[in-house]
Image (cartoon, rainbow, N blue to C red):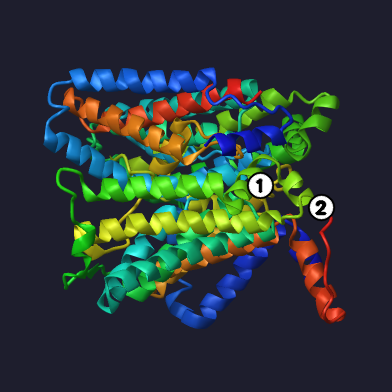
Amino acid sequence: MPNAISLSRSSTGTPTQRRFEPTQYARIAIVLALAAFALTTPGFLTEASLRSLLSAMSFVGCVAVGMTFITISGNIMSFSLGASLAASTIVFVATLPLGTWTSFTITLLFGAALNALQGWVIGYLRANPIIVSMAAFSLIIGIMSVITDGNGLYIMGTEAVIFKRNMGPVPGPLIAFLACAVVGQLILSFTNIGRTIMLSGSNPSALLAAGVEPWRSTTWAYSFAGMFTSVAAVLIASRYGSGDLLHGAGFEYSAISAVLVGGTMIQGGHGSVVRTVLGMLIIAILQAILVLRGFSTQYQHLTLGVVVLIVIVLQWKRSR
Amino acid sequence: MRSLWNNRTARPYLLLVIMIAVFSALGGDTVLTVATLRSVLQHFATLGPVALGLGLTILARNFDLSVAGVVGLAGCVAVLAGGTYPVVGVLAAVAIGAIFGIVQGTIIVRMNLSSIGVTLGGLLTATGLAYVATGNQEIRLANANIPPIMDDPLIGPMSLRFLVTLAMFAVAAIAVARTRAGRDLLAAGSDPKAALVAGVPVNRVIIIAFMLAGICTALGGALLSFSLAAASPLPLSNTLVPAAAAAIIGGVSLRGGRGNPLGIAGGVLVLSALQSCLTALRVEPFVQDIVTGGVLFLVGIMDGAELRRRLNDVYRRAGRGAFRRGAPSA
């Protein structure tokens, strides 16, 4: 993380090596306050509530890790990650007879290719990312509906059992989510591709001057996004035993919420996967508290919207 | 033909004519019926207001994602508040839409924030409010007389809902083409800095564009829920993609300042006709998704800032054989 931040900073002309800014202290304070509030909420620490909280968070979390790449690369958000997830669940279930890990690999490659294509169009032709991803949403859902004839596929064998397993008390999806987050952060901070993705968000002309074509990093950012989304697809397909176009509906909105609440700037070039994990945690804890304190589920939707709006408005101070 | 194609406003209508020709060749009498025409007009009344609202903000070089949330929220508010007096319901819905637009526009302008981010928050907030207002369930309109008033043919095949939408487009088209405010909107959208220098109150224009987007969308949502006699908080329904597609097929440039409501109306007609004709031919509904997505994808590519340069590169390489290009010029 420090590496990535200093890279984006130096490109804007104000090199800072500080690891924590005041806003980051504020964010940590908010997480601690939320945690304290959560711990005093009756029923929060019961195993069942914690486990359901963490599992539900993990599916969206993987997509959010992917979305982080798109946001950081300066392309705001993708509207097609939910559709990409749905298509990937079908690919996973359809290829499952080939073997667990073959199918897993194919699904990841499928997700990466599906989104890399969008990334290429967006980067190479400088097409509008919002329009391209909306179009991709329609195309993916439409084409997959024709292929599957609108029916879901069901897992018959036992090949996918490994993706349902929990490690003792720790839910399996949580482990996958944290693994995605670690891999994602490593890619972003310690690889050339990751650094160029960061730079393409903060200063594409500098990237061009450095001899890297920005469309390459855009394409990479989208393919990573697709890959992490497909991890979520594998988890969901295994958990629910089916590949269905209804899976993942609306996930892109939850994912971008987590990215923004974590403090990644919507203009791109500034942020990290760790922040997205924090953002996901904040949202999940908040929603769990609401449920446990007796508010009905509709208040979760409202809180999410208001929190995202507040976070966006707060970015104003930091963007100048 | 070519000059007609290059005219941004005429393009959707040309597309419409081509499409109708293709469909009548495919289906003949099963497609060209009064029932299809009525269904086109009803689809127009559903999609039109949202596309118009979104289009107005795109003209001002912004993008209002929240229309997809406001349309649902307005529908819920209209049904909740319009149980006895439908007019009260519509007014309440429109007021909510206007407030949403003003608040978002003000935040965007005053804090110099990206419209996508702010309206994403607005979209989620509007959807959340709809969930809270309805208690997370479908609410039904008590007065059963309202849906026929909305949907029964009033003049020829045109229903009240369609006429209201048509009026919205007419007012918007005249305002954009003939009034000072309309020219200010286009100026603010095409070059905000130059417009400011020329004396256009850019900030106010943008706030008003968002307010109008909220009003149009809310009115459309209210009339839709009256016509269905029910409203429910649809989770981030898929109105956004067709609305954006209609505005962009209608010749609105994503870079702002180019396009007009007449073109948007054409774009909405293209999508409505597509949907109705496919239904008349009993084609699976997914085909509509594919066509809409495909067209939007194509338009997105054609609008790409570097398309021309990349095509030039391809021609040059093809012309000179193994021509190797150095670092491209930005």
Q: Are marks 1 and 2 on the same chain?
A: no
Question: Dot 2: within a 10 Å radius of its alpha carbon, few (fewer than 14), some, or many (20 or more) residues?
Answer: few
Disc 1 vs disc 2: which is toward the camera? 1
Q: Which mark is residue A299?
A: none
Three-letter amino acid code of the residue under disc 2: Ala
Q: Is residue A114 above or below residue A5?
A: below
Question: As rendered, which of A31 and B256 lies closer to the eye?
Answer: A31
Q: Quadrant of residue A203?
A: top right
Question: As rendered, which of A269 and B138 lies closer to the eye?
Answer: A269
Q: Quadrant of residue A37?
A: top left
Residue visible at 34% across and 45% down in the picture: A178
Question: As rendered, which of B188 and B48 lies closer to the eye?
Answer: B188
Measured as percent of width and height from the top left, residue B149 is found at 36, 43
Residue visible at 65% across and 61% down in the picture: B301
Element carrying mark 1? helix
Q: Is residue A188 above or below residue A48?
A: below
Measured as percent of width and height from the top left, residue B9 is found at 71, 55
Chain of the residue on which disc 1 is drawn: A
Element carrying mark 2? loop
Q: CA distance from mark 1 to mark 2?
A: 14 Å
Three-letter amino acid code of the residue under disc 1: Ser
Which residue bears the numbered disc 1?
A200
Which residue bears the numbered disc 2?
B330
Residue visible at 79% across and 37% down in the picture: B191
Q: Quadrant of residue A38?
A: top left
Chain of the residue on which disc 2 is drawn: B
User: Does the image show residue B130?
Assistant: no
